[in-house]
Amino acid sequence: MLLIIALMGCFSGCSNEPTPTAPQAESALERVMKQGVLRVGMSTFVPWAMKDKTGRLIGFEIDVATRLAQDMGVNVEFVPTKWAGIIPALITGKFDIIIGGMGILPNRNLKVNFSIPYDYTGMSIVAHKKLAEGFNSLEDFNKPGVSLAARLGSTAVTAARRFMPDATLSLFDDESQAYQELLNGRVYGVVGSAPTPGFQALKYPDKLFLPLSDTFTREPIGFALRKGDVDTLNFVDSWIRVVEEEGWLKERKRYWFDTRLWEPMIQ
């Protein structure tokens, strides 16, 4: 009996035949190269991605996605998507990749794979001059009766709830709706990724101001891909390392975030 068991073990464990594996799904990289188009999921918010006076998309993320497609030798197709639904849209195959200033967060990582960071951002807050007069700290906003606004599904929501849990938070599909709520005097402040709150304060100096001199968080930003797509993830990571070493990412970031040279294109 022992001899039979040993022989059975040898047949099952010593065979030279490869173990059957499940068929592998086509990677995004294979699909893009085959069809010649990189489909990019993104959402508009200044200066990451916005429309110029002719309706053309411009901004830091638009530059990044366009350069990535050029280096792959394919065309780029932008798929504007509401931020709250952008990860489900990626998972269902509406586009190949998210390039939209998306913060790398563990809860998001349960649903998608992230590239290495290609940028860092932080949360800022812009406030209404009359409602928030004298406010100069997060503690000033963290009180019952104080209302804030943020974009639904963004890391601004996480930051607001973490640092100002006692304030009332209103959420909007589009960031511009949150800023309109602030301009109308219906909320004390808007929490958003820098530098947009600062731009809003500069744009409406009679109504808005920056109560904090700097950002109050620091977040790594990465490309989001469908889970398990190792080939595409490896390619994107390599691409980031190359353009980072070139200094190209730093140069584009400086142009869109530290200058206003692009403003005539949208006004």
Image (cartoon, rainbow, N blue to C red):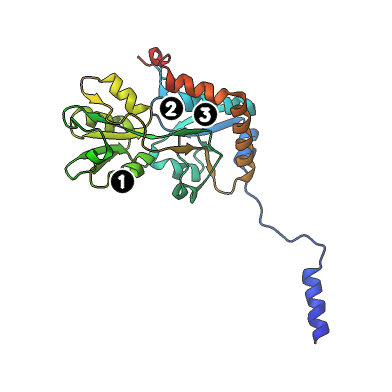
Q: Disc 3 and disc 1: Cα gap in Å? A: 35 Å
Please rate how many residues cluster around mark 3, counting C-alpha atoms within 10 Å: few if below 14, some from 14 to 19, many from 20.
some
Q: Is residue 3 left or right of residue 179?
A: right
From the top left corner, tell me how far across and down residue 258 is, in percent. Answer: 43, 20
Point out the tag, 2 or 3, that comes first from the N-terminus: 2
Q: Disc 2 and disc 3: Cα gap in Å? A: 16 Å
**Amino acid at circle 1:** Arg
Q: Residue at x 48, y 21 (%)?
A: 254
Pointer 3 residue = 77
Pointer 1 residue = 161
- Quick check: 243 above or below 83? above
Q: Which mark's residue is nearer the viewer, 2 or 3?
A: 2
From the top left corner, tell me how far across and down residue 37 is, in percent. Answer: 58, 30
Residue 127 visible within the image: yes
Q: Is residue 50 left or right of residue 231?
A: left
Q: Are marks 2 and 3 in contact (CB under 8 Å)?
A: no
Total numbered labels placed on residues in the image: 3
Q: Residue at x 60, y 45 (%)?
A: 229
Point out the tag, 3 or 1, that comes first from the N-terminus: 3
> Could you tell me which quadrant the N terminus lies in?
bottom right
Please rate how many residues cluster around mark 1, counting C-alpha atoms within 10 Å: few if below 14, some from 14 to 19, many from 20.
some
Mark 2 residue element: loop
From the top left corner, tell me how far across and down residue 230 is, in percent. Answer: 62, 45
**Amino acid at circle 2:** Trp
Q: Disc 2 and disc 1: Cα gap in Å? A: 24 Å
Residue 154 visible within the image: no
Pointer 2 residue = 48
- Quick check: 2 above or below 75? below
> Could you tell me which quadrant the C terminus lies in?
top left
